[in-house]
Amino acid sequence: MTVSIIIVNFNSGMFLNNCLKSILKNVKVDYEVIVVDNFSTDNSFTESRKKFEGMQNYIFVQLEENLGFAKANNIGTEYATGDFLHFLNPDTLLRYDIDESYLKAFQDIGKIYVHLLENPDGCIVNRGHRLPLVGVIIKSLYSGNYPKWHLGASVLVHKRTFELIGKWNESYWMFAEDLDLFYKCYQKKVEVEILPSVVYHAGGVSCVSIWSMKDRERKVNKSFRLFFKINSIYWHYPVLRVMLGMNKIFKNTGIYSFSEK
């Protein structure tokens, strides 16, 4: 089987180049790389294209405007010829054991797969946040077996399963599109599995170039509220806000503060 590694880039500086080098060094299975650039204003895309475009399995697509993470990823799939799609952030690094993940995924094309992520401080994250549904939150209080969502920094899925899930929801420009994707997995009963290889993830590289931390938080919360509206489950939102205020049970949900400011 072949893997199409899809990377959406926006002002990622040297991170994109380093990510591509890690792919070239460590991926041994049949693969192609598709870099979709969201109209970067730095030289991250142009410099990486100069170094890698001559290679047969590297494709570079430059958009004429910033269409957001979800739409750019979907555009990348239109160029993909591989059996599996690996959605990968430009601020990540693949390691020597990445092929173990691919070979494991090849054994069951009906699942969606994610990697654990190593933060710059060495912490390993992405074991999963509770889906922000009232029933799920209540269940998580007495059971460890509850539906989760994961960060979209490294997601691996077979093309047919991706079509079944319904692709990335382009209603989100940035943030919460990964929550929406895994919510659809929950609805479609698509099993999520964490793969053995850990992927390094710097995190927040594109956001730093355009937003302050406060602006970023506002945009995150706006996107999370949009999630409830899009999926016609908005009644969960005020109930979960009450739960947040009363018991602080959102500590590990990944829902941030739900600030209205």
Image: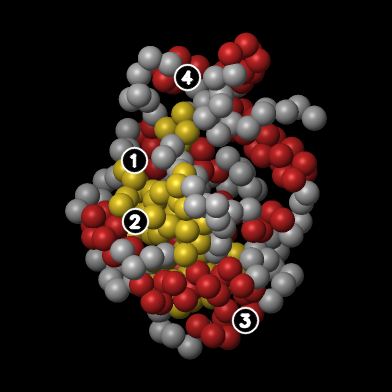
Tell me which label, 2 or 4, sits earlier in the chain.
Answer: 4
Tag shown at residue 137 = 4
Tell me which label, 4 or 3, sits earlier in the chain.
Answer: 3
Tell me which amino acid carries mark 2: Ser
Tag shown at residue 47 = 3
Which numbered disc, 2 or 3, marks the residue closer to the eye? 2
Tell me which label, 1 or 4, sits earlier in the chain.
Answer: 4
Tell me which label, 1 or 2, sits earlier in the chain.
Answer: 1
Which numbered disc, 2 or 4, marks the residue closer to the eye? 2
Rendered location of residue 141, percent (x, y) = 43, 16
Query: So how many labels did they put on this image?
Result: 4
In this rendered view, identify the residue nearer to me: 140 or 226: 140
The residue tagged 1 is 192
Tag shown at residue 127 = none
Q: Are marks 2 and 3 in contact (CB under 8 Å)?
A: no
Tell me which amino acid carries mark 4: Ile
Asked whether residue 120 appears in the rendered view, the answer is yes
Q: Do the residues labelled 4 and 3 touch (CB within 8 Å)?
A: no
Question: In the image, is residue 238 above or below residue 207?
Answer: above
- In which quarter of the view is residue 246 placed? top right
